[in-house]
Image (tube, rainbow, N blue to C red):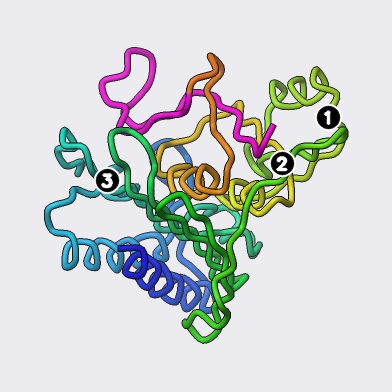
Amino acid sequence: MLEILERSAIAAGRAILDIYNAGPAVAYKADASPVTDADHSAERIILADLAANFPDIPVVAEEAAAAGHVPDISGKLFFLVDPLDGTKEFVGRNSDFTVNIALIENGVPVTGVVYAPALGILYSASSRKARKALVVDDRIASPQADIGCRICGDRPVALTSRWHNSAETIAYLANHGITDYEAVGSSLKFCLLAEGLADIYPRFSRTMEWDTAAGDAILRSAGGETLTMDGTPLTYGKRNQRHDSDFANPWFVARGKP
C-alpha cells in the first residue's frame, strides 16, 4: 500500500508544480480559505489512484468534503486526503506546501505520506517505521532513510503555524519557558518533529483532520505523539460533534520524545 500512496502523492505533486509554475487561479471557499485549480487537479489524481487500487476503502478528501461528498466511514478503515496542504504557502510562492494521504484504522493514523513537491522531499510511514527520501524528476532518487524523534533537551525548539498562529500558542510557549521557535507552513511541522529537528508543535487554532492525519501518522511512527488538551491522543473520523463541524480537530500539542 505505501508504495502506491507514495507514487500517487508524487504524481499529484507534479500536477501541483505544473500549475505553480504557470500561475494558479485562486478562489475562496465559504470559510474564506483559498482553493486553487492545483487543489482540484491533485485531488482528482489521488482519488482515481485510491479507487483503482483500494475500491473497498472509503476516502474523505478535503475538496470533495467541502462540496458535500462524504462517504460512509462506519467501518474500521478509511483514507484522509489533503491534496494541497498549505494553499496560502502555494499562493504566496513559498515552498512549504504538501500533498497528504493517510490511512486511518479505528480512529488512529497508521499509514501516511507527506510529499513537499517544491522541496523534493517525501516523508512516509507504515508499520511504525518513518522514512524520508529525496525525489528528483518525479522519482525517489535516494535510499529511504529511517527517521526518528529526538529526546527533548533543556532548551526545546517549538514549531508554530506561519499563517494561523494565535495568542494562546504564544502564551503556551511562554508558560513552558520555550523561547526558541520557528514558523513553518503545512504538515511539514509534524515531519520536522519526526525527523528530530524540533521538539514540540502546539496548535491552538483551527485544523481539520485531513490537515493533520498524514503528518501525525509519520510522527507517531517516529516515536512521537499528538495529544489533545486533556492528554488523550488525537483521534480521526470525528462526526456529529456537538460544538464543531465534522472532521474538525480540537486544539492539540504534537511532540517528539518528551
Residue under the point 59% across and 46% down = 190
Q: Which SS class for mark 2?
A: strand
Q: How far apart are marks 2 and 3 (CA)?
A: 27 Å
Identify the element where label 3 is drawn.
strand
202, 225: nearer the viewer: 225
Q: Position of residue 107 (x, y in %)?
A: 32, 33
Side (left or right) of 72 relative to 182: left
Separation of marks 2 and 1 at Cα, in angstroms: 11 Å
**Residue at which label 2 appears:** 159
**Mark 3 or mark 1: which is in front?**
1
Which dot marks residue 60? 3
- Name the residue located 52 percent from the left edge and 59 percent from the top edge: 98
* Magenta part of the chain: 233-258
Question: Which mark is first along the chain, 1 or 3?
Answer: 3
Quadrant holding the N terminus: bottom left
Mark 2 or mark 3, earlier in chain = 3
Circle number at residue 57? none
What x and y, as percent, mark residue 197?
Answer: 74, 51
Whether the residues at callouts 2 and 3 have beta carbons within 8 Å, the answer is no
| Residue under the image location 25 percent in, 61 percent down | 47
Res 178 label: 1
Image spot of residue 226 (x, y percent): 54, 32
**Viewer-proximal residue among 43 and 157:** 157
Residue kind at label 2, given as amino acid type: Leu
User: Measured along the vertical axis of the image, is residue 134 above or below residue 158?
Assistant: below
- The three-letter amino acid code for the residue at tag 3 is Val
Residue 252 in picture, x, y percent from top left: 56, 27
Verify whether residue 242 appears in magenta: yes
Q: Disc 1 residue type?
A: Ile
Q: Which SS type dominates the magenta stretch?
A: loop
Query: Please, is residue 63 above or below residue 144 in the view?
Result: above
Label 1 residue SS: loop
